[in-house]
Image (spheres, rainbow, N blue to C red):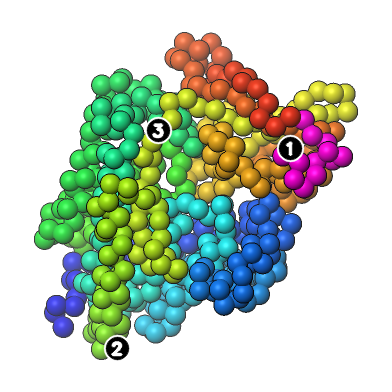
Amino acid sequence: MEWFVADHAWLGRAVFLHGLAALYVVAFVVAARQGPALIGSRGLTPVPTFLRRSGTRRDGLRRAPSLFHLHWSDQFFLTVCWSGAALAGLSLVGVTARLPLGVSMAVWLVLWALYLSVVNVGQVWYAFGWETLLCEVGFLAVFLGDASTPPPRLGMLLLVWVLFRLEFGAGLIKMRGDACWRDLTCLFYHHETQPMPGPLSWFFHHLPRPLHRVEVAANHVTQLVVPFGLFLPQPWAGVAAAVMLLTQLWLVASGNFAWLNWLAVVLAASALPDAWWSALLPRPVEEWLVPSRAGAAPYPWVVAMVLLTALVLVLSRRPVLNLLSPGQAMNASFDALRLVNTYGAFGSVTTVRHEVVLEGRDEQGAWREYGFAGKPGDPGRWPRQLAPYHLRLDWLMWFVALSQRYAWPWLPRLLRRLLEADAPTLRLLGRDPFGGERPQAVRAVLWRYRFTTWAELRATRACWHRERVGDLVAPVTLATAEKDWW
């Protein structure tokens, strides 16, 4: 079956699957560590409440398939998360690839089903494009084969199709969105106002403005022109993929976008020809990634691959129509299983950065600031490199600073949990100024942040300058923090 085999993609497939397994580990660990406080039975948006509002079990399974429609408990949720992390870890170290084909496929299918179950009850905390992207590529991974079967040409093309939609959709949403993308000025602001700046974002922001224009123009070429090169014969498809891979690494260096950029990296890596990987990887690593190149393509697997391709083509209709639509939606799913989706980000770019700072009042009447693990707070605290780890609360706080409509109903509950000194909630933060004790009152304060200048950095060693705007939420106490007080 020469037509079925992509002989140039043994290493590309292996790199992709190992990279995907690593990101699965991160995703499941994030869910286990943050999930109980965010969506647990006493979480900020409890899953039991969400399930009750989803209608009957049958309705819930139809609209958002999840194991948790069948059973929910906080312990069961943690079991799902840690089981997923363990299976992904086995795949990362190569165990899954060495299993018989049917068992290997079953492992990847279980990983996909477990993570889809989490995403479909994750509510606002999981409403990000990289969640859907992980579900989509995770399903495709089920059919890519094990170490003893040849890489399927159709399967590798389906990965390319995902990468094309990811990049081209992001490019179109920019050109149709904020005028600053068309006049090449968006990066005058983006590095400073993005949701989660990284340790190099300050330096990126202070690059000369002509270079910022070049960055935007290069982004347009990478997202609107280069993706078509993915469908050319090798090595030209590899050249297009390499351009995208390097661009994604540039984005990794300039900010924190969870595993979005890293998923794009592993997708692009799958399109690089084996000759390139052989030149990049030392022989021991190459042999570890691909322990065997023997074996044929079992007929049932070939049939399954053909049926999957037909399914993806049918389900691609609505995402393609969305790409062509002037009202293009960002990061949307068109089927309950999130098999074929549409992507895009930053159709608009904010020019001013506001941050919500949470404070508690001590017994002496002084206000103390809670620290977050990732988002800006103390002006002297330099941003951290966090991606692919995802701090969900920190990200949602960025949206609250844009509009209070993003805060309901979880921000009032967050403030109440701080008043109660709730331990799981406090673990979502980077610093508790009360050391686990209860504050007398809490409030949410809105600040205007900007990066310091070179002169200010030399004088103060602080990367941020901030000015208070006012209270977003006035001080509340346990006596006044009723369920619907805000």
Residue name at image x 38 percent, y 44 percent: 345
On residue 349, which mark appears? Answer: 3
Q: How far apart are marks 2 and 1 (CA)?
A: 56 Å
Going by the numbered disc 2, the residue's amino acid type is Pro
Residue name at image x 81 percent, y 29 percent: 361
Residue name at image x 31 percent, y 59 percent: 319
- Please state the extent of the stretch shown in magenta in the rendering: 475-486
Task: Quadrant for residue 284, please give it.
Answer: bottom left
Q: Which quadrant is the N terminus positioned in? A: bottom left
Please state if 146 lies on the left or on the right of 400 as rendered.
left
- Secondary structure beneath dot 1 equals loop
Q: Where is residue 313 in the image (x, y as percent from the top left)?
A: 26, 70
Q: Mark 1 points at which residue?
A: 432
On residue 375, which mark appears? Answer: none
**In the depicted view, which residue is nearer to us: 392 or 5?**
392
Instruction: Answer whether labels 3 and 2 touch (C-beta < 8 Å).
Output: no
Residue name at image x 40 percent, y 33 percent: 349
Going by the numbered disc 1, the residue's amino acid type is Asp
Q: Where is residue 311 in the image (x, y as percent from the top left)?
A: 30, 75
Vertical position of residue 48 compared to residue 428: above or below: below
- Secondary structure beneath dot 3 equals loop
Q: Where is residue 29 in the image (x, y as percent from the top left)?
A: 57, 58
Disc 1 versus disc 3: nearer the observer: 3
Q: Is residue 280 visible?
A: no
Disc 3 versus disc 2: nearer the observer: 3
**In the depicted view, which residue is nearer to us: 293 or 322?**
322
Q: Which quadrant is the C terminus positioned in? A: top right
Q: Distance between the residues labelled 1 and 3?
A: 32 Å
Q: Mark 2 points at which residue?
A: 300
